[in-house]
Image (spheres, coloured by chain):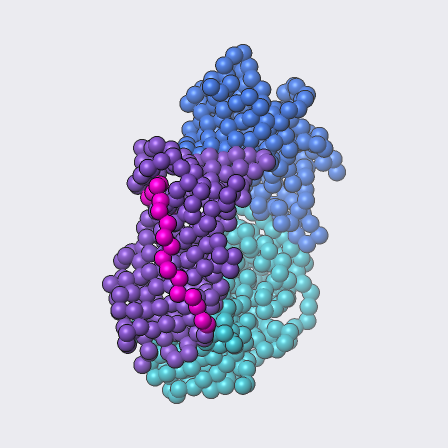
Chain colours: A blue, B cyan, C purple
Amino acid sequence: MADARFYFSDARTWRYMVASIEKIIEEGVFVATGEGLSLRALDTSHVAMVDLYYPNTAFIEYDIGGESVEFGVSFDLLSKVLRRARKEDELVLEVEGSRLAVKLKSRGERTFRIPQVVMTYEKLPEPKVSFTVRARMLGSTFREAVRDLEPHSETLTLRALEDALLLVGSSEMATVEIELSQSRGSLLDYEAESQDRASYSIEYFSEMLSAAQAADAVVVSFSEDAPVRVDMEYLGGGRLTFYVSPKIE
Amino acid sequence: MADARFYFSDARTWRYMVASIEKIIEEGVFVATGEGLSLRALDTSHVAMVDLYYPNTAFIEYDIGGESVEFGVSFDLLSKVLRRARKEDELVLEVEGSRLAVKLKSRGERTFRIPQVVMTYEKLPEPKVSFTVRARMLGSTFREAVRDLEPHSETLTLRALEDALLLVGSSEMATVEIELSQSRGSLLDYEAESQDRASYSIEYFSEMLSAAQAADAVVVSFSEDAPVRVDMEYLGGGRLTFYVSPKIE
Amino acid sequence: MADARFYFSDARTWRYMVASIEKIIEEGVFVATGEGLSLRALDTSHVAMVDLYYPNTAFIEYDIGGESVEFGVSFDLLSKVLRRARKEDELVLEVEGSRLAVKLKSRGERTFRIPQVVMTYEKLPEPKVSFTVRARMLGSTFREAVRDLEPHSETLTLRALEDALLLVGSSEMATVEIELSQSRGSLLDYEAESQDRASYSIEYFSEMLSAAQAADAVVVSFSEDAPVRVDMEYLGGGRLTFYVSPKIE
């Protein structure tokens, strides 16, 4: 009998989430309580934070066999396993002593057993950041915008206009300006208390692209020269959030 | 206000055209007159010529703000920008002083500004070449034939038979012979005054593959040991023509 | 007139078969008799055998101009040519003196002529191996299972359970277990006289992946620590079989 068992309907969502997490943090500890499964960790440069939360209701089965259970994983190894997840696969995670069983279930059942990572970790509080600008968009809109900027710029600047969000990047050879707005249908929702602006290293946004691929929606929140919060919203109320500190220019 | 503005319905046609032009010439000057937009330039080895012509009627908007306007571009940079063009994108080129704004318009508006290239250029006359053979085919037929030959041959020989065009290539290990004809449905049109033959370096045909991807039709015209003319025909009457000098064997 | 002519409806089946054969043996001699076309050869390490047989009924045309005909080929070169086979292409092989003409026929006719390989070869008997376990599956099931294991293991262990076939692999970091069964719909047929087990180098299974892509079904037969036989079944009764000697642990 497994110490804990998490049965999720869509293995590919986890494949795409973990493919992003893997690029930002090497190892991390999942904490499962009665409410849900969470993970909060900083990258080694302490510029970015990953904050995942899945309520127990998002699972087909959610059995933690007690008050809470923790299991540490290598995200590189977990991602290598989840890379095999196919469209029709369901996902079962089972904590088995010092190992984690990752089961991909569809016509066949494929079980990958990987060692858990024993590690101490810092219980990070939720960042206390207020935002004046909030833009909600499809995952594809987020991905295309970052992909447009990537070839031309190391910095991504967010600029809030009255009715549009500008994503701006530049190199010696080219400047790129992407305008997203509700009127054009490229934003689902947009609020801007003030026309703030902030810049970030585009590298972190590139690392979020995989997670955005499975997201129902992406919400970008920021304010003048402050950290950005990027929420990926998933089926069943799951959420993967990235915080990135600004580049002060 | 832009000095000149060219609004085109399908950004991807320009992406594929420029992806071919970029492989043959590094920089070139577009010339816009009342009739249309054109570009004519030789590659550095003077073996191939690129000759583009788009009538003003092919544009949704065609405003040159005067008698004519010229703007030089780096095709490598323009191609890098246009690589982001997606299926639903429209294209706007705006001449802004010393810069060129390239706008990709669909749900969002994405603006890429690149420097113009200041360069002297030789006004080349249209090559005076007569052709005895003329074969019209789909872009895909042209692409597949060149792709069949590429792995096996550095030379592409065109041989006109009475009712078929032969494309022939050979290496030490293999000879390849591709027969295209109206009777087989692989040619849309075919005329051969005489059963002429000519050979060319296949490299230039490989460089045309991208442009053929967006073409409605491709017309290959040649005669005995003479330059070949390859016309790519596009929506709205746009035309991109390549001339390649023969390899004399 | 060709010395022998083999006209087959689907060029891509041969493209995928030869793409696997090429990875196991460099050269081989096809033997065509009144019954059909066959090829049997060992890899250089004598761990794997390739055994192809196509009955004459599987061909649209099967003309060997006499009692039998033999032609040697370089599988690397034949694969390079067949790589150009497209979905709608038919295949014609014509023995022309010291050359082999490979014709891909659809809207156009593309003829590739390659030299035959003059080689002596050992007439290998069909291996006398008995099997206690026999599992029949779709080509895609076979491919996905091998792909699941490849990243994690150099060895593939087959373990017969009463109603399921287990494919197991392990590395220092992960163990992988794939369960295929009729009850789960991942096996078309399954017989196990005894719960035998045998291990093989996964490399040979990876080399079979291309051949499995065109197969209607794949049958895996083995017994305790004995060679495995993997039959790829194709349209028209064609069959490509791989034998692989076990890894004794």
* Image quadrant assignment for residue C69: bottom left
Quadrant where the C terminus of chain B is found in the figure: bottom right
**Residue situated in front as seen by the camera: A55 or B30:** A55
**Residue situated in front as seen by the camera: B90 or C187:** C187
Q: Do we see residue A133 in this rendering?
A: no
**Residue situated in front as seen by the camera: B131 or B112:** B131
Identified at 35% across, 44% down, the residue is: C131
Left or right: residue C230 versus residue A20 is: left
* Image quadrant assignment for residue B69: bottom right
Left or right: residue A94 versus residue B217 is: right
Identified at 67% across, 63% down, the residue is: B117
Q: Do we see residue C25 in this rendering?
A: yes
**Residue situated in front as seen by the camera: B177 or A13:** B177
What secondary structure is the magenta-colored segment mainly?
A: loop
Total marks in image: 0
Image location of residue B231, percent across then percent down:
46, 72
Q: Magenta part of the protein: which range?
A: C119-139
* Image quadrant assignment for residue C118: bottom left
Image location of residue A52, percent across then percent down:
56, 26
Furthest-left residue in view? Answer: C57
Tell me, yes or no, whether the highlighted magenta stretch contains residue C130.
yes
Tell me, yes or no, whether the highlighted magenta stretch contains residue B217.
no
Left or right: residue A218 versus residue C126 is: right
Image location of residue C37, percent across then percent down:
32, 65
Identified at 61% across, 31% down, the residue is: A74
Image location of residue C153, percent across then percent down:
53, 41
